């Protein structure tokens, strides 16, 4: 039993730490909000990690999928629809549909062009959100309450929310792992390593990549809806390209080799951002060089750190 | 006579002013090994690209088992039964040797929109992949990472991948390139064993190998077929000897 779990030691430890965190001094309102934000970003980052690490699709527009999910919550809220059984499926479908439509164009390109096109679609979503004056435009939209669950206000319970998020993260991580190991995932990985070889075997990578992009978008939509609930506020800044850059950075910071790298990256990112901001208002001056150092010296991301230390 | 497996009709391809394929017409019959030889830069690889579907010809047609496939993309042609090996090895370096071949088996099993079961433990895929590896003598290296193979082993893997596709036509672009003398010996043996079962279009610089294997040889110079026929007639052809300028076959 133990031997079978050993290869999963790091992700299991991560999930255990997240499960115990509220009991170990992270139970106060502010730290729980911080954790919620980290878990939601991790959820979104897992979708992006499947794209970048698995399929080799480096998207710089992933935050737009989150934004679409978040704005789905806003629009439904404005129409007085706040039932989770409606809100979350709509947000997931909206995120997926946005990814499907933009991906249908973007995936026809590759490399730098793909990055630029996803960035452009992200910016289009950003300016669209900013122009939605009915939903606050640039100023954003504040909720009076969170999405209701079976007619209750359960999502407003911080502990319930924390463990619900954790369960979703566990599901996304496990599902993503299965996906990448499946026949489908094998085609994605092959097309990343050598698209020509993959085609010569008889695969057209396009539909596989487009479906992966759509699934990641749907997960992003869910994460966006959750983030809207966590912050009880949505603004166009959610979709700014810097947010997409942050997500990409989390994935790379954690390490592309394995999916839990995205979780590690999101946690590290949120915690660093928080504590550096406490140290100095000029925290970005420290954060920036730190990112450069990681990119230079930690090629496998944080995942590769233990091996690196062991070798000395 | 039976319909040819592959027929090229008046293929033409130019890169700018450089004509690389000039009115090339040739056939490969079922079970026949048709070799293409010619000096460096003659346009052999470019011709293979047009057959496999990586490059579109400027003019002319490609027929496969009687069907005009000129407009079909690479992946569609592969599904029809056209397998190619690459002159510059193109195995998936991050995959294991077995997984490289299992992916080819998987390609033959229809679509791969299966999301849950780990592909690496699918016995049906792995068994057929192992069989292909055994055919080329690479079974003992199944677990190795493909990127870590020696050059000759990669050539064997290329061949195993092509075989696992269970194609009707093998397009082999210099399968012996860069292999050592022992590996070459072994690869020629493998090709000899495969010959009766497939149509093959073989591009190769190794003349002894070509003359040992080929049923028919076409000589390509500056994109043109200057001679085509049985090995003996090619050996005796003065135009070919002139093109190879004193090279000894
Ligand atoms: N994409 C391309 N664009 C421009 N020129 C090209 C291109 N591909 C090949 N060529 C040129 O076309 C000619 C034929 O190239 P090709 O690779 O088909 O030759 P080859 O017969 O396979 O040579 P070798 O024996 O060295 O493999 C060469 O002069 C090459 O430089
Ligand atoms: Mg060549």
Image (cartoon, coloured by chain):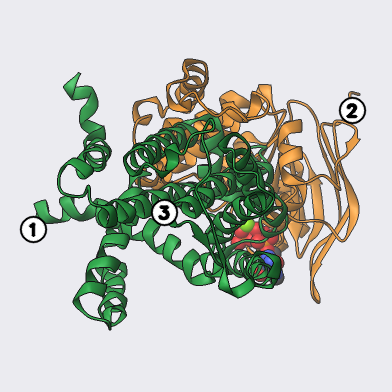
Of all chains, the one bearing label 1 is A
The residue to which callout 1 is attached is A312
Q: Nearer the viewer, residue A230 or A102?
A: A230
Which shade of the palette goes to chain A?
Answer: green
Q: CA distance from mark 1 to mark 2?
A: 67 Å
The residue to which callout 3 is attached is A41
Q: Which mark is residue B31?
A: none
In the image, what residue occupies the spot 53% across and 49% down?
A225
Query: Left or right: where does residue B117 sit relative to residue A16?
Result: right
In the image, what residue occupies the spot 73% across and 26% down?
B31
Mark 2, Cα crowd under 10 Å, few <14 / some 14-19 / many 20+, is few
Q: Is residue B189 visible?
A: no
> Which chain is orange in the rendering?
B
Q: Position of residue B111 (x, y in %)?
A: 67, 29
Q: Position of residue B230 (x, y in %)?
A: 76, 38
Q: Are marks 1 and 3 on the same chain?
A: yes
The residue to which callout 2 is attached is B3
Q: Is residue A89 above or below residue B163?
A: below
| Ligand 1 is within 8 Å of the C-beta of the residue at disc 2 | no
Q: Is residue A5 above or below residue A17?
A: above
Query: Left or right: where does residue A222 sit relative to residue A168?
Result: right
SS for tag 2? loop
């Amino acid at each position: 039993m133990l031997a079978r779990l050993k290869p999963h030691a790091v992700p299991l430890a991560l999930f255990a730490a997240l499960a115990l965190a509220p009991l170990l001094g992270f139970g106060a309102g502010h730290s729980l909000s911080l954790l919620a934000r980290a878990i939601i970003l991790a959820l979104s980052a897992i979708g992006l990690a499947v794209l970048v690490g698995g399929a080799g699709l480096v998207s710089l527009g992933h935050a737009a999928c989150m934004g679409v999910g978040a704005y789905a919550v806003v629009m439904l809220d404005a129409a007085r629809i706040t039932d989770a059984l409606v809100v979350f499926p709509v947000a997931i479908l909206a995120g997926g549909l946005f990814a499907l439509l933009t991906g249908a164009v973007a995936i026809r390109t590759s490399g730098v062009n793909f990055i630029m096109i996803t960035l452009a679609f992200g910016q289009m979503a950003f300016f669209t959100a900013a122009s939605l004056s009915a939903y606050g435009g640039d100023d954003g939209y504040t909720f009076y309450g969170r999405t209701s669950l079976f007619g209750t206000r359960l999502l407003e319970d911080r502990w319930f929310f924390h463990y619900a998020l954790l369960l979703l993260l566990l599901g996304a991580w496990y599902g993503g792992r299965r996906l990448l190991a499946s026949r489908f995932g094998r085609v994605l990985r092959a097309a990343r390593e050598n698209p020509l070889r993959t085609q010569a075997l008889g695969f057209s990578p396009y539909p596989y990549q487009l479906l992966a992009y759509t699934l990641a978008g749907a997960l992003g939509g869910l994460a966006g809806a959750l983030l809207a609930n966590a912050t009880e506020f949505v603004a166009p800044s959610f979709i700014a390209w810097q947010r997409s850059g942050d997500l990409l950075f989390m994935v790379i910071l954690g390490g592309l080799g394995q999916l839990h790298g995205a979780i590690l990256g999101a946690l590290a990112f949120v915690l660093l951002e928080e504590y550096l901001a406490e140290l100095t208002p000029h925290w970005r001056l420290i954060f920036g060089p730190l990112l450069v150092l990681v990119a230079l010296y930690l090629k496998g991301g944080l995942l590769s750190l233990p091996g690196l230390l062991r070798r000395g | 006579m039976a319909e040819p497996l592959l027929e090229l009709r008046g293929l033409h391809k130019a890169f700018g002013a450089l004509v690389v394929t000039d009115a090339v017409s040739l056939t490969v019959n079922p079970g026949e090994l048709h070799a293409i030889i010619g000096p460096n830069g003659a346009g052999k690889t470019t011709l293979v690209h047009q057959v496999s579907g990586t490059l579109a010809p400027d003019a002319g047609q490609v027929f496969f088992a009687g069907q005009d496939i000129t407009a079909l993309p690479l992946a569609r042609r592969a599904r029809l039964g056209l397998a190619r090996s690459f002159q510059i090895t193109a195995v998936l370096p991050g995959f294991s040797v077995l997984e490289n071949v299992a992916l080819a088996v998987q390609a033959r099993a229809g679509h791969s929109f299966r999301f849950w079961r780990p592909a690496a433990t699918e016995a049906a895929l792995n068994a057929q992949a192992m069989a292909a590896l055994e055919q080329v003598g690479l079974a003992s290296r199944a677990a190795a990472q493909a990127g870590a193979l020696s050059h000759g082993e990669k050539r064997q893997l290329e061949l195993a991948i092509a075989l696992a596709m269970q194609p009707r036509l093998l397009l082999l672009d210099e399968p012996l390139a860069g292999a050592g003398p022992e590996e070459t010996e072994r690869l020629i043996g493998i090709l000899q064993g495969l010959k009766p079962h497939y149509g093959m279009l073989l591009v190769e610089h190794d003349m002894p190998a070509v003359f040992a294997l080929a049923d028919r040889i076409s000589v390509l110079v500056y994109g043109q077929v200057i001679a085509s026929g049985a090995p003996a007639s090619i050996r005796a052809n003065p135009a070919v000897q002139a093109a190879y300028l004193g090279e000894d076959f």
